[in-house]
Amino acid sequence: MEKRLTLPLTDHDILGLQAGDAVLLTGTIVTARDRAHQWLMDSFIQPITIPDQADLAALDHLKSYLDHGVIYHCGPVVRTYPDGSYKVTAAGPTTSLRQELYTAEVMHFFHLKGVIGKGGMGERTLQACQDERAVYFHAVGGAASLLATSVRRVLGVYQLEFGMPEALWVLEVKDFPVIVTMDAHGNNLHASIKAISSAALQRLYNKKS
């Protein structure tokens, strides 16, 4: 039975989730991949460059969406219409482990309550989930067109100069389907399954030996 949650999320929402829970998310999410995470780190979180006025304005807008919000590791395919409007035609998840270098810091900076992606993440992100009372949501890979049907409209886009997949897209979603695989209680479904699979493989190997 899916749990329905509305963004932004509260501590109560998060602490009520356990690894393995199926969730339908409704509200606003922001996509961010490698380039976007690097920009956030280098410009604001651990600055090594001086942000310009456009960067600062983008940050102000993003904070309004990401405070107790959710980042989605996704490079959407977006159709642009002559009137300047957008339609998301594919919204599949990107492999999240590529963002492990940045995610904990980004979670703390924005007080994120969730990260959506595929494949799970590492120990630093798992610890950040406990510290921030947040979760990692796994979205199904290979279902980009199906997931796009949950995107109701594009509310905005930032850093489009990074390219369409790497820009930060602000998406209004309804009943976006995800599964909690890393929770705020320290449970990591990816690690558990890996351990079970490794043990089963070792038993098979021992039998053949």
Image (spheres, grey):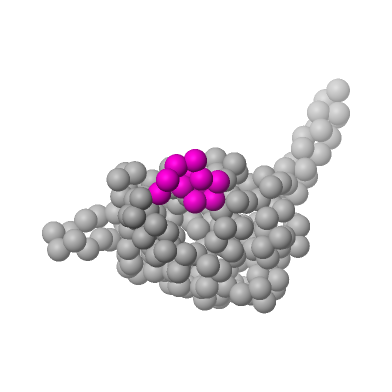
Would residue 156 appear left or right of 115 to someone viewing this image?
Answer: left
Q: Quadrant of the C terminus?
A: top right
Q: Quadrant of the N terminus?
A: bottom right
Q: Quick one: which residue is furthest to the left in this view?
A: 82
The reply to whether residue 39 is visible in this rendering is no
Q: Residue at x 60, y 51 (%)?
A: 105
Q: Residue at x 42, y 64 (%)?
A: 60
Is residue 123 in the magenta section? no
**Between 36 and 40, the one nearer to me in the picture:** 40
**Between 12 and 24, the one nearer to me in the picture:** 12
Would residue 85 appear left or right of 2 to someone viewing this image?
Answer: left
Q: Quadrant of residue 4?
A: bottom right
Q: Quadrant of residue 102?
A: top right
Magenta stretch: give its range. 41-51
Residue 183 sits above or below residue 200 on the image = below
Q: Quick one: which residue is furthest to the top in this view?
A: 209
Q: Residue at x 59, y 41 (%)?
A: 101
- The percent position of residue 9, horizontal first and vertical second, equals 57, 72
